[in-house]
Every structure is written in C-alpha cells, then in structure tokens.
Amino acid sequence: MTLLTIWADDDPGVELTRTSDVEEITATLGALGVRFSRWPVVDLPPNPTSDEVIAAYQARVDEVNDREGYTFVDAVTMTPEDSAEWRSKAATARAKFLSEHTHDDDEDRFFARGSGIFYLHIDGKVHAVLCTEGDLLSVPAKTTHWFDMGTRPDYVSIRFFHDDDGWVADFVENSIAHNFPTYDQITA
C-alpha cells in the first residue's frame, strides 16, 4: 500500500500527515512539483533481467520517454538472499542512498515489484513516500531527498535518465536523514 507521511523537518516525532489515499498523495505531491501516478502491474519472472522488465512495460516506458525526453532506461532487481555476500551487497547499496542529496536531473522510478521509500525534503518538511508495486514517482531535479530500501531490499524498479551517466548525486553537507524513521520502522 502506497503511503505518504509528512513531518516538519525539525520534528520527526510528530506526523503532520499520514495517508494512503492515492488521490490525496497525488495532489499533495503535485503541489510540490513531484509527479506521482500508478501503472497496472505485470507479472515478472522471480529474478528478471533489466531487458525483461523493460520489455514487460515497454509501452509505458515509451510514453514516459516521449513525454519527458529520457534517453536511458534500466531496471534494477534486488531480491533477498540468505548469503553473507548478498547482505554485504545490499548494505552497501542501501548506504549509498541514505544521505540527503540532489541530482541535476529528475529522478523517475517505477516500482514493478516490492517497495522503497523516497524522502523529499521540501519547504521545511520531509515527505516520505512509501512506493509500492505499480507506483511511478518523479523527483524533480535539484530536490533534496534520500531513499531507503530497508535492510532486506526486495524490489524491481525501472529508472529513467536524460543521459547515459545514470545516477549521479550531489550530497548535502548536513544531512537530516538519520533523524527520521527508516524503511524498516515505517513498514514494521
């Protein structure tokens, strides 16, 4: 279930808003310049390749590319395993996204399976968007944010880029991300 939780950026102990109403989420995010929509979910193999995921959603991917001018699209699959190697890989991947950062490009993600939380730090508030399968979220360029996939990531997402460099972040000096509830706390 998609969930939007909002706090003042200086008071993570008090929720200002908590809603799973998709229309309210779409309107609230839209007022911030953040695009949010839902796509029908397509069945995928247990560990799909990037090409399989994109092919399954090709018509939708083409729509987004045509509308937004993206030139590079890939898909990422994170499926939990019970190996030390996987746990290390997952922890490294998670740590990369947990500090506040911005991008010179929009950050568009579609969740084909599983979930993750985008935390948007906008206008003195933190908007945590728990994206679940079927959700497409577009974080506008230069928006301060972070992402948490949890300690046991389990998702398949399609990522859209305007150039072949892909994901390039500019980290902020004094991140507040560590002050807010994590994916594991919110989804417990």
Image: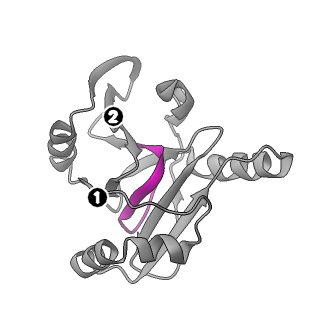
**Spot occupied by residue 133 in the image (x, y as percentages of width and height):** 40, 49
What residue is shown at x 49% (from left), y 28% (from top)?
187
Query: In the image, is residue 115 part of the stretch drawn in magenta?
Result: yes
Task: Note whether 174 is above or below 40 in the view shown.
Answer: above
User: Which mark sits nearer the N-terminus, 2 or 1?
Assistant: 2
Task: Note whether 104 is above or below 7 in the view shown.
Answer: below
- Quadrant in which the N terminus is drawn: top left
What residue does disc 2 label? 3
Label 1's element?
loop
Span highlighted in magenta in the image: 102-118
What residue does disc 1 label? 39
**Spot occupied by residue 93 in the image (x, y as percentages of width and height):** 66, 53
Q: Nearer the viewer, residue 152 or 57?
A: 57
Q: Quadrant of residue 67?
A: bottom left
What residue is shown at x 60% (from left), y 58% (from top)?
46
**Spot occupied by residue 9 in the image (x, y as percentages of width and height):** 37, 29
- Name the side, left or right, on which 47 lies relative to 39: right
Nearer the camera: disc 2 or disc 1: 1
